[in-house]
């Protein structure tokens, strides 16, 4: 009986691999050639000097396939194609959705601002995976002369790690292989942080849903084409961040079409609106000098069952451990904040109103 079960498991695994390959045209082992700076999607995509060999473990081929065998949740329900690219010589936007960085909320809030004819796609994927999907859809729709723009959000790294843990703890809809072990080993956030800081050689990332070490930095430089490639432990957890990769991430913060800040979400939405509709008036809710207008912002908050929380809930020791886990993210977030404040000043001067009163 045991031999039969083993054989059946192998057959199922191969079948899922074949299905994924057929659906996405991804070989089981492929060489990804992203653009020279994954951040400038207008550059020719065949000039990349570095080839990144991406091995696809059978049990983590895709977050969607992973839902079948319990290794991961499916991609966010709020992600996907929000606007189909319909007209040549227009723009196609791709949102690099970093989990627990307001990505689901932004996907809902932002789609209505994309002009008709432009395209808009979001997913929990690496920049290379996003660009691959944009290119594929443009080719399918027989469009030409398209320009691509990448978007993302950044968040205070300590709050980000805390939110990752709380979703893994509270989101009963999210199942993955090893969740029971995770709940046993990490009954509180202190135990979770200890796992990655006190004994990093004993991380056992296969038991967790999110790999927390510098997730935001990894999401800006990873090259996997798979769902979850920017945060899943078995793919993203293998990415080593050296000085060159950190510099690439910082460059990407400056070169993306849009980078929002979770802590200044409403003002970030106003900057985004100005990016995609530069000739249109800003929405009324962008006038922070007018309380009634500012409070009219129709924000969506997709919580994934995470209760209200603040990083001030953490002990000083836990905050220090979170800082250790996010050494590179701290620098990336700082660069994102600097860009945000530059763009606020420029937009306010050009538009003649205040969008950031905090």
Image (cartoon, rainbow, N blue to C red):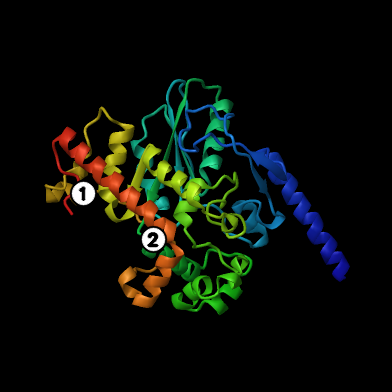
Q: Is residue 189 above or below residue 212?
A: below
Query: Which residue is at 60% across, 57% downward?
Result: 238
Residue placed farthest to the left in the image?
A: 290
Task: Answer with the quarter of the image where residue 312 lies.
Answer: bottom left
The x, y position of residue 53, in whole percent, is 66, 45
Disc 2 marks which residue? 157
Is any atom of residue 261 visible in this view?
no
Q: Which mark is residue 15?
A: none
Q: Is residue 88 left or right of residue 208?
A: left
Q: Is residue 47 above or below residue 21?
A: above
Q: Earlier in the sequence, mark 1 or mark 2?
A: 2
Q: Secondary structure at mark 1?
A: loop
Is any atom of residue 266 visible in this view?
yes
Please state which of residues 59 and 37 is positioned toward the viewer in this rendering: 37
Query: Callout 1: 10 Å neighbours few (<14), some, many (20+)?
Result: few
Disc 1 marks which residue? 296
Query: Callout 2: 10 Å neighbours few (<14), some, many (20+)?
Result: many
- Cα distance between the residues tagged 1 and 2: 29 Å
Q: Is residue 244 above or below residue 85?
A: below
The x, y position of residue 43, in whole percent, is 49, 28
Query: Which residue is at 42% across, 52% downward?
Result: 104
Q: Are marks 1 and 2 in contact (CB under 8 Å)?
A: no
Q: Secondary structure at mark 2?
A: helix
Query: Which residue is at 21% across, 37% downward?
Result: 346
Please state which of residues 49 and 194 is positioned toward the viewer in this rendering: 49
Q: Quadrant of the C terminus?
A: bottom left
The x, y position of residue 245, in whole percent, is 50, 48
Task: Answer with the quarter of the image where residue 158 lies.
Answer: bottom left
Q: Is residue 36 left or right of residue 304?
A: right
Please state which of residues 196 and 119 is positioned toward the viewer in this rendering: 196
Q: Quadrant of the N terminus?
A: bottom right
């Amino acid at each position: 009986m045991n031999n039969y079960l083993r054989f059946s498991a192998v057959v199922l695994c191969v079948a899922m691999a074949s299905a994924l390959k057929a659906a996405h045209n991804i070989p089981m082992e492929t060489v990804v050639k992203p653009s020279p700076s994954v951040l400038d999607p207008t550059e020719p995509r065949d000039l990349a000097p570095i080839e990144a060999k991406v091995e696809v473990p059978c049990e983590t081929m895709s977050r969607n396939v992973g839902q079948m065998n319990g290794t991961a949740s499916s991609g966010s329900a709020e992600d996907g194609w929000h606007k189909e690219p319909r007209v040549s010589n227009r723009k196609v936007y791709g949102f690099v959705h970093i989990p627990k960085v307001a990505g689901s909320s932004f996907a809902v809030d932002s789609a209505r601002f994309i002009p008709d004819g432009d395209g808009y796609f979001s997913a929990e994927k690496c920049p290379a995976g996003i660009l691959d999907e944009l290119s594929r859809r443009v080719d399918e729709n027989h469009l030409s002369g398209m320009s691509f723009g990448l978007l993302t959000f950044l968040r205070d790294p300590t709050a980000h790690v805390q939110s990752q843990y709380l979703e893994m703890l509270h989101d009963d809809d999210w199942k993955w292989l090893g969740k029971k072990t995770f709940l046993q080993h990490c009954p509180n956030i202190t135990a979770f942080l200890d796992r990655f800081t006190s004994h990093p050689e004993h991380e056992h990332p296969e038991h967790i849903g999110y790999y927390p070490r510098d997730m935001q930095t990894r999401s800006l430089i990873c090259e996997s084409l798979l769902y979850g490639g920017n945060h899943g432990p078995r793919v993203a957890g293998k990415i080593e961040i050296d000085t060159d990769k950190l510099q690439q991430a910082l460059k990407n913060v400056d070169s993306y079409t849009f980078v929002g800040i979770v802590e200044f979400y409403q003002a970030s939405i106003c900057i985004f609106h100005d990016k995609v509709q530069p000739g249109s008036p800003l929405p009324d809710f962008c006038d922070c000098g007018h309380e009634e207008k500012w409070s009219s912002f129709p924000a969506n908050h997709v919580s994934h069952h995470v209760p209200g929380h603040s990083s001030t809930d953490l002990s000083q020791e836990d905050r220090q451990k979170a800082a250790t886990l996010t050494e590179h993210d701290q620098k990336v977030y700082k660069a994102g904040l600097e860009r945000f404040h530059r763009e606020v000043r420029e937009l306010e001067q050009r538009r003649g109103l205040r969008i950031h009163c905090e």
